[in-house]
Image (tube, grey):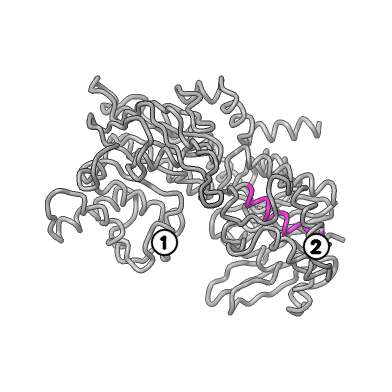
Amino acid sequence: MNLLEINKLLLRIGAVEALKGVDLSVNVGEIRALVGESGSGKSMTALSIMKLLPTGARTEGQIRFDGKDLLATSEADMCRLRGNEIGMVFQEPMTALNPVKTIGEQVAEGIRLHTGATRAIAEEQTRAILDRVGLPSAKFPLSRYPHELSGGQRQRVVIAIACALKPRLLIADEPTTALDVVLQAQILALLQSLVDEERMGLLLISHDLAVVADMAHSITVLRHGEVMDNGETTQILTEQTHPYTRQLAQASMHVPERSPEHPHHAGNNGPLLAIRNLSRTYPGRRIGLFGRDAEFKAVTDVSFDIKPGQSTALVGRSGCGKSTLARMVLALDRPTSGQIHFAGRRIDQLAQDDLRPVRQNMQVVFQDPYGSFNPRHKAERLVSEPLFLIDRELSEKEKRDRVNRALERVGIPTADRDKYPHEFSGGQRQRLAIARAIITEPKLIVADEPVSALDVSIRAQILDLFADLNDRLGIAYLFITHDLAVARAITDTVMVMSEGKIVEHGKTEEILLHPRSEAGRALVKASPDLHKALARRIGEQG
């Protein structure tokens, strides 16, 4: 008998049929991957197992855990199961954690609730599990709050909470989406070791087929709430007999078609963006009334150029200074020293009013478009926001025409301009964010992890769009990313950043094939690769 057995699971939320007869199983010590595009029903399957569905949801079928039908289980019994027998690692650790409670309190809470342990015993067990997930109390005191930790450290706290009582089944919903590749490798290795040592079953929800190929014993592929493919991971991903599985595999390795050279690269008119000896230092935390910690150097002596129409990737681990550098390029933060020249003009010392023409020609695409949109405004207003940067007053017709042209360029019907952000899918919202960025016809776009939260099919579409805009409009890009596959697919040059410094800079293929710096080698080694993972698994089985 399997540890978890789902038979003919149907889920309706209002008039929407979210799951249509899903079958899957997880055995003791097995890692089962659940993959598919956004909206395929992956998270709804996980929430059905945990019985954390929204009000009004109706389920049919069976979800058996250790022979017990969870759908027929009372809420009181489910509360005893959650965290004790079944743990769950949620996708976004910052929203899963309570910002006003220390990490020690949050890990100990479940221990005390389920075991009735005293505060001292719960604290001792909390130290042990946090040490197990790589957060020893000597370096990471239990008194720390979530905001005082990095993304990878917060994800480790969430795993500690889920695994504190050694559950028999662990559900991990996109546990590494926003992490850099080195942290991702560490988190996945941690999950693998927990499965091996504790003999727990793991249901791994992911859109990254390379990760799945490297970790999972078996795989279930979902689309529109239906199981498309199911079986042993290596066989399913190698043979790709189902058209949808083949489509996902091709999308995960998709490289957009780009012109090797286009007119925007031609000429020796100088760089579009020139950074010279840029540094940013922050004062240390206050200690007592008069004392401070040592100052923190976020960026140290950075210099580089971006030519008109050039696409450059800035890669590096979390906390290496990428976002600080981007804020200075965007004139949102002043450098401590150094110079920033844009289109031949020094901009790092300009007053806010003098930055208007600069901002017109330099726009940004954020990682989370939904968080950067006002949910109360319609698409037309959201996309037209940067138009105030244009020197002259635009008529309503001119504004409408510009919005329509921007929407058409990113592949969104102009009729959708009257929709609100929540009425668009994740990929469509990212297209809206790009439309907003290009409406002023800028020369440079800074894209901060623009595809990290998207599934492989939508990511392929967005990368195609970036490449097309680069070819047609000559827009230069500074891509901030931890995904080396994205850097390889869309950029001409790569800069590797480590501890606030650019440690390597060169052509994309040269850097990614033959990294010279230690930081570059670590990123390349940790980066998931579908072909390599499958080859390794086949070799092990052979």
Q: Where is residue 102 in the image (x, y as percent from the top left)?
A: 65, 60
For the N terminus, give its image quadrant.
bottom right
Residue depicted at 73% across the width and 78% down the height: 75
Q: Does the magenta stretch include residue 160?
A: yes
State which tag comes first along the sequence, 1 or 2: 2
The answer to which of 370 and 26 lies nearer the viewer is 370
Give amino acid for label 2. Ala
The answer to which of 132 and 28 lies nearer the viewer is 132
Residues tagged 1 and 2 counted as in contact (Cβ below 8 A): no
Q: Is residue 106 magenta?
A: no
The answer to which of 508 and 455 lies nearer the viewer is 508
Q: What stretch is highlighted in magenta?
A: 153-165
For marks 1 and 2, give the one nearer the viewer.
2
- Residue 21 lies, with reference to residue 360, above or below; the image says below
For the C terminus, give its image quadrant.
top right
The residue singled out by tag 2 in the image is 122
Label total for image: 2
Q: Where is residue 352 in the image (x, y as percent from the top left)?
A: 24, 47
Residue depicted at 59% across the width and 74% down the height: 54
The residue singled out by tag 1 in the image is 424
